[in-house]
Image: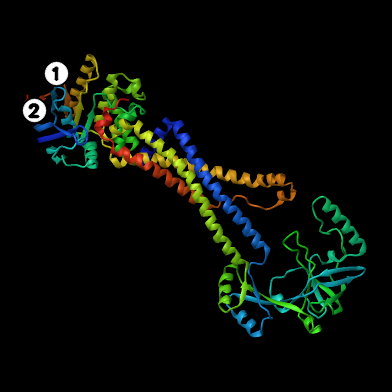
Amino acid sequence: MIEVKSLHHTFTIGKKGKEKKVDVLKGIHFNVQQGEIVSIVGKSGSGKSTLLQVMAGFLAPDAGSIIVNGVETAHFNEKQSAAFRLENFGFIFQNFQLLPGQNVVENIELPLKLKGVSSAVRKKKVQELLKKVGLTEVADHYPNELSGGQQQRVSIARAMITEPPIILADEPTGSLDMQTEQEILLLMQQLNIEHNLTFVIITHDEEVASIADRTLRMSDGVLVEDK
Amino acid sequence: MLFKDQLQFVLQHMRKNKLRVTTTVLAAMIGCAFLIVLASVGFGIQETMRDEILNQEQVTEIDLWGDESLSPEDEKWISEVEHVNVVLNKADISNPITSTFEDRTGHSQGVILDMDAQSKLPSNLSAGRLPQAPNEIVVGYHYAQSLLNEADQAEIERKSKEAEANGTWYNGEEEGYKGEILGKQVKLEITMDEEGTQSETATFTVVGILKKPSYDWYTDSSIIFGQDLLEQFPKLVTYPSTKIYVDSLENVMPVLSELKEQGYQVYSVVEQLEEMDLFFLIFKIGLVFIGTIAVLIASIGIFNTMTMAVTERTREIGVLKAIGASPALIQRLFLMESAFIGLLGTGLAILLSYAISFGANAILPHVLAYALSDESLTKTDFTFSLIPLNLVLIAGGISLLVAILSGWRPARKATKIEVINALRQEL
């Protein structure tokens, strides 16, 4: 499903003339199979978030290859990358990243709108998902009227609405309390089983890593463990 | 993304920032309305002057000047020029003619016309017919009014003095012969030479009366003779001239240039119109240019609003890009917003300009009349401001284009936002 080969990424920091190069990813190799939950763990600064951003196409790698569903994405331009994300990835972020001016339904259907799906089809799909994530009663609420757990459920529903094969999650429970964290992890596990969804989860939380089929540990820009 | 959804997205944002969007729309409206109203003054004055010229004389008439009367060969050549309908020979009698009728006398300018040619033109008579025999004449509309007896003269003198004391003048319309002059015989004393030493007297029958002149202030007491007057009085000194009548207005200029090429001294009021139109074209371009400056100032408002919108929505743009919105879509959404502001501003500006234009045309004559203490100004048919469709299209086009252009940079800026940096922003 996902094949990452000798992936390199370098950040340039400092003022012009005094630039300094920092190697963040130093030749990463790994594969993810369909239906797998893979967690990537590591300390802050280990390069795990950068790895996800490069995989998502938010950053272009300096070298290496990323093959998703048989398509090489490492050299995509911005437009190709956006179109590819819309078809293949769903995103779950630590701080939910919902649009504050749009209600729950509008936030969830946003990816479908971007794909040009008609409002009748959108409505049907959103209703189904609302039931699945347990948000039917707050469908017309705005993000600031929801709890953290509810917001993350909206975010998960938004990630799944286009039925992408892969969900990329960056610290999905980082802003939640213990109990809510458990609920969200349960939901993700349930979706993984029901829809055979592939999850790549970035986290520093061992609890999250416990639901994963495999855990990759990163340290200083390299993978040090795969179990 | 469906167009309907894009539109809904843009409108949702505009509603969220009602105050800012409204003030920007107002600025765009004022800029565009200023442009339209300013240029409309140029259009209004031009229209008034055009009407003035077109009412003044027959617009299909060409004057031909020369020291001598037109030779038969010249006349034949001119009458064969394409689009020339009639060549009318005319001669002005040098000295005023004194008319005597009953106990009344009057003074008139005399004109000799080629009645065959005149009969081919549309009738210029309000009553009667053209002369067919010697000693038949046509008189001006005010001819009867110009025939005064002693009592009338004293009365006019008195009324004139009274009017003068009030700062106006009196045209003598209440005096003169009030009966029917058509069919009556009048005795005319015609001066033969320029010095006025020799004169002849003869009796003529009035067979026709000319139409009322188009201007209220003009009193026409002229006398029109047939060409047989020259046979009757061969020594009569006259100033010949020729008028050429063309079939329609648009053919006046081609005929005019053909005659000029042949060396004839010709003049038409249409030439004046063309010169005037050129002058007004430059004048109007100048006004549109000044008005565009106002639109440009308004565009700074649009630029600021859109820049603010992009800055405020950086995180939102980041989310949209992250979940798969193309840079082109992001740019389009912001351009639509600035175009929408421009469209609203322009639409309102057009309504406002028409209101100002109608208001100005209705109120300004009264204001002027009051300021200049001249009541007659309220009745004048003066157009101060005129908004033709092409002005609306030009001004609307400029205003919309400027609105879209001022949204261009902010929209480009929005597409350049990096997802990672945008997502890091706090709400």
Q: Amino acid at mark 2?
A: Leu
Same-chain status of marks 1 and 2: yes
The residue beneath circle 1 is: A206
Q: Quadrant of residue A154?
A: top left
Question: Image height check: is B144 above or below B111?
Answer: above
Counting from the top left corner in percent of width and height, residue B59 is at: 64, 67
- Is residue B2 something that shows in the picture? no
Residue at 42% x, 31% y is B17
Counting from the top left corner in percent of width and height, residue A195 is at: 19, 29
For the residues labelled 1 and 2, the Cα–Cα distance comes to: 17 Å
Q: Chain of mark 2?
A: A
Q: Quadrant of the N terminus of chain B?
A: top left
| First-in-chain label (1 vs 2) | 1
Would you say A182 lies left or right of A138 here? left
Frontmost residue, A64 versus B241? B241
Residue A36 numbered tag: none
Mark 1 surroundings: few (<14), some (14-19) or many (≥20) residues within 10 A: few
Mark 2 surroundings: few (<14), some (14-19) or many (≥20) residues within 10 A: many
Q: Amino acid at mark 1?
A: Glu
- Is residue B88 something that shows in the picture? yes
Counting from the top left corner in percent of width and height, residue B77 is at: 61, 82
Counting from the top left corner in percent of width and height, residue B236 is at: 79, 81
Frontmost residue, A185 versus B249? B249
Would you say B236 lies left or right of B103 here? left
SS for tag 2? strand
Residue at 32% x, 39% y is B413
Q: Quadrant of residue B259?
A: bottom right
Q: Quadrant of the C terminus of chain B?
A: top left
The colour scheme used to paint the residues is rainbow
The residue beneath circle 2 is: A223
SS for tag 1? helix
Question: Image height check: is A188 above or below B244?
Answer: above
